Amino acid sequence: HDPRRRDFINIAAVSFAGVGAIAIVLPLINQMSPSADVLAQSTTELDLSKIQPGQAIKASFRKQPLFVRNLTPAEIASANKVSLSELRDPQTLAERTKPGKQNWLITLGVCTHLGCVPLGAGEGENRGPFGGYFCPCHGSAYDTAARIRQGPAPKNLTVPEYTFTSDTTVTVG
Ligand code: FES
């Protein structure tokens, strides 16, 4: 009986099991990737024509909540009078909207702290102390440009890529 030969057989058996496990995992990954690719390229069409000044709607974009808000002149003025030095994530309303369309504020509805959906886009929801959005999970408050003003969130609500395809229609993505 030669102990070294037995070791070789055991090692060979283990290696073979390892190869088998890899061969099973790969087809699962291959099956998952096409739908992830499709999702990553998907766009969302929005009709803004029914959203009155002061109103917001919740839509969805790539499986995430999307907030679309028609700011009133007072909300625009309130965003524009804040100096950038007061902001944790300094950005102007103009940088977060399109030229000539500063009233249309389009952001993901995902708190930049831990990802809860903030309040403020639904009818009658609490918009928090800065009049924009309020995250009930840990109290992050966003202003009328959806910029973080108070609470633990580090960043403003994300503005996705979008283009106006007419005066009242937008393609997001
Ligand atoms: Fe919004 Fe924590 S997830 S404050």
Image: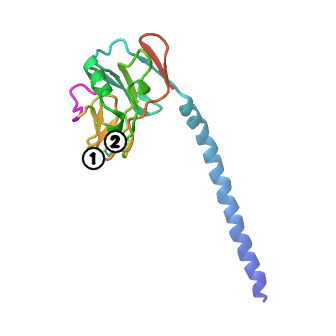
Q: Quadrant of the N terminus?
A: bottom right
Measuring from the top left, give residue 52's x and y in whole percent: 29, 14
Q: Position of residue 27 (x, y in %)?
A: 65, 47
Q: Position of residue 50 (x, y in %)?
A: 33, 13
Residue 117 in view: no
Height in image: 86 above or below 76? below
Q: Which of the pair 172/63 is nearer the observer? A: 172
**Numbered badge on residue 116:** 2
Nearer to us in this view, 108 or 85: 85
Check residue 138 in the rendering and tell me which mark sits there, or answer none: 1
Q: Is mark 2 within 8 Å of ligand 1?
A: yes
Instruction: Give the mark toward the camera: 1 or 2.
Output: 1
Q: Amino acid at mark 2?
A: Cys
Q: Does the numbered disc 1 mark a residue whose Cβ is under 8 Å from ligand 1?
A: yes
Quick check: is 110 in the magenta stretch? no
Residue at 74% of width from left, 71% of height from top?
12
* Residue 125 within the magenta-colored segment of the rendering: yes
Foreground: 37 or 7?
37
Establish if 8 lies above or below 156: below
